[in-house]
Amino acid sequence: MGKASPPLSLKPHIDCDLPTSAMVMAAGLGKRMRPLTATRPKPLIEVAGKSLLDRALDGVAAAGVEHAVVNAHYFADQIEAAVRARKAPARIDISDERGLLLETGGGITKALPLLQGPEFYTINADNMWIDGPVDTLRLLAQRWDATAMDALLLLVPLSRAHGYEGRGDFHMDGLGRLTPRAGIRMAPFVYSGLQIISRALFDGEPVEPFTMWRAWNKALENGRMFGISHPGLWFHVGTPASIGETEALLQEV
């Protein structure tokens, strides 16, 4: 992983090697966000005056990550225009998924030629995070250990998962090793949509629709899937109603 210069910040600086690339997942149809997504893609919906896509890319730039990839399918021309309009220090490439419905795993596989380094960040554009005491992406990078991990997920305690309506995703032991929720039972941690993941989990995969679980299951089988608990705030912006709820909570921050 290449060393990136730290951004100017009042937060305590975490000196660590950063993954060179971050992939922002922005190709979804946003069906639950209708009617707002009838004329625009979900990542361009604004929360408190800024689009979800810009919030994700701002986080990438603030951490000092030098390169981003954004995949585009639904209203792809709007995603491309929004990326071109940014004046960001990070270089941004578009992974064009027009005519394809690849889901998360397939989208990453298609973007592999654009992504740099043996591991990279992935960020779901419909989830918002607010840093805790330190920069969130740098916190992930500090905890990353390529000798022991193929995936390191940022998790949110179920009790603090604003806008989330599920039963949780994972159990986590004292060393950070993850176990998926079983059946209809509850799990104490929710996947935040942010992770560092190894390129090796996607090498050799065909460019076809598949979810992140195909890659995660490889890591789980080898005991190489870990998590850390997010010390800041997190919001799942999944429906029109959740926009106002998120904005109200942001006013309290």
Image: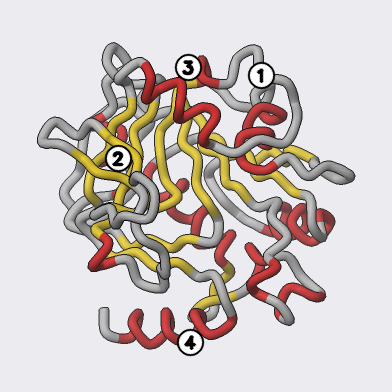
Q: Which residue is drawn at the image coordinates 83% and 42% (left, top)?
A: 100
Residue 91 in sight here: no
Q: CA distance from mark 2 to mark 3?
A: 17 Å
Amino acid on which the number 3 mark rests in the picture = Pro
Residue 172 pos. (x, y %): 21, 40
Under circle 2, the secondary element is: helix
Q: Quadrant of the C terminus?
A: bottom left
Residue 128: quarter of image: bottom left
Amino acid on which the number 4 mark rests in the picture = Gly
Under circle 3, the secondary element is: loop
Residue 58 as seen in the image, left or right of residue 251: right
Label ID, residue 244: 4
Under circle 4, the secondary element is: helix
Name the residue that disc number 3 marks: 118
Q: CA distance from mark 1 to mark 3?
A: 16 Å
Label ID, residue 205: 1
Residue 18 as seen in the image, left or right of residue 36: left
